[in-house]
Image (cartoon, rainbow, N blue to C red):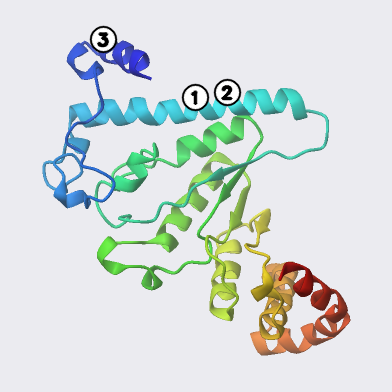
């Protein structure tokens, strides 16, 4: 990595930029405004050096994805396997200008730059699915002092995948068994002009098989299956799901016993 950084800095005519990463970016527990590099006004991220370093750093991630996908495709081509790539949903400080947590992870996404379109375009070249998380989260449920905005982040990613014409799949980030989270998943998975191509529900554990949670889950799956065309309220869905709840009861009881 340091050899690559050194070469990139020399190519820019700035060899002094090639010996290390930012030295004023703080540490894991610093807030962005407590650091010189990530702060809102005059932060290094928004200057010539910051642009150089973050471009190089994010390019490393894209090139890594290219290499892994090239290798995976050479093995899995003509097998019927669909390749899906997990992209982390880093929504902390999304409301800030620098988006420090995303920059730290190699996603060069700021208030002035779309960091997810290049990732989506890279995945599109390989015919891979863009798999994103935090689909169940709502902005107001997250710590407001950290300027968390998962809903806005999900919308940005959906637009990027639409522009790049790459399929979008989703996951929930935290185990949730309530209708409120289910409704948010459905809303996010069916927003815009197209639906998500797949959704992974996390996570199967004893709580999922509790009677009330299982009833809600069955109704949720039914609603997801019916897609945008369904105009039924949750109560109606849950009534229709009762049949499936009854039919699956022996299997649910068996699963619950095995998982304890």
Q: Secondary structure at mark 3?
A: helix
Residue at x-position 53% and y-position 61%: 135
Q: Residue furthest left?
A: 42
Q: Which residue is mark 1?
A: 63
Looking at the image, how many numbered discs can be counted on the residues? 3
The answer to whether mark 1 and mark 2 are in CB contact below 8 A is yes
Relative to residue 230, is residue 137 depicted above or below?
above
**How many residues crowd mark 1 within 10 Å: few (<14), some (14–19), many (20+)?**
few
Compute the Cα span from label 1 to label 2: 6 Å
Q: Which residue is mark 3?
A: 10
| Residue 233 appears in the figure | no
Q: Which residue is mark 2?
A: 67
Q: Secondary structure at mark 1?
A: helix
* Quadrant position of the N terminus in the picture: top left
Task: Give how far across and how far down residue 5 sits, in percent.
Answer: 32, 18
Q: Earlier in the sequence, mark 3 or mark 2?
A: 3
Mark linked to residue 95: none
Task: Give how far across and how far down residue 138 sits, in percent.
Answer: 44, 69
Q: Quadrant of residue 122?
A: top right
């Amino acid at each position: 990595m340091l050899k690559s950084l050194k070469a990139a800095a020399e190519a820019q005519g700035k060899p002094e930029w090639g010996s290390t990463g930012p030295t004023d970016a703080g540490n894991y527990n610093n807030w962005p405004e407590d650091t010189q590099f990530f702060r809102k006004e005059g932060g290094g991220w928004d200057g010539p050096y910051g642009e150089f370093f973050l471009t190089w750093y994010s390019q490393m991630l894209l090139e890594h994805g290219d290499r892994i996908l090239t290798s995976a495709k050479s093995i899995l081509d003509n097998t019927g396997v669909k390749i899906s790539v997990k992209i982390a949903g880093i929504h902390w400080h999304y409301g800030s200008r620098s988006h420090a947590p995303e920059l730290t992870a190699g996603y060069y996404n700021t208030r002035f730059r779309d960091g997810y379109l290049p990732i989506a375009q890279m995945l599109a070249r390989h015919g891979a699915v863009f798999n994103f998380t935090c689909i169940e989260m709502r902005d107001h449920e997250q710590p407001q002092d950290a300027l968390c905005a998962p809903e806005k982040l999900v919308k940005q990613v959906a637009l990027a995948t639409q522009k790049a014409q790459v399929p979008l799949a989703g996951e929930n980030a935290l185990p949730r068994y309530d209708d409120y989270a289910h409704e948010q998943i459905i809303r996010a998975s069916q927003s815009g002009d197209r639906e998500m191509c797949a959704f992974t529900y996390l996570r199967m554990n004893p709580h999922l098989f509790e009677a009330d949670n299982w009833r809600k889950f069955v109704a949720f799956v039914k609603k997801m299956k019916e897609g945008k065309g369904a105009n039924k309220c949750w109560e109606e869905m849950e009534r229709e799901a009762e049949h499936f709840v009854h039919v699956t009861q022996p299997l649910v009881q068996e699963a619950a016993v095995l998982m304890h």
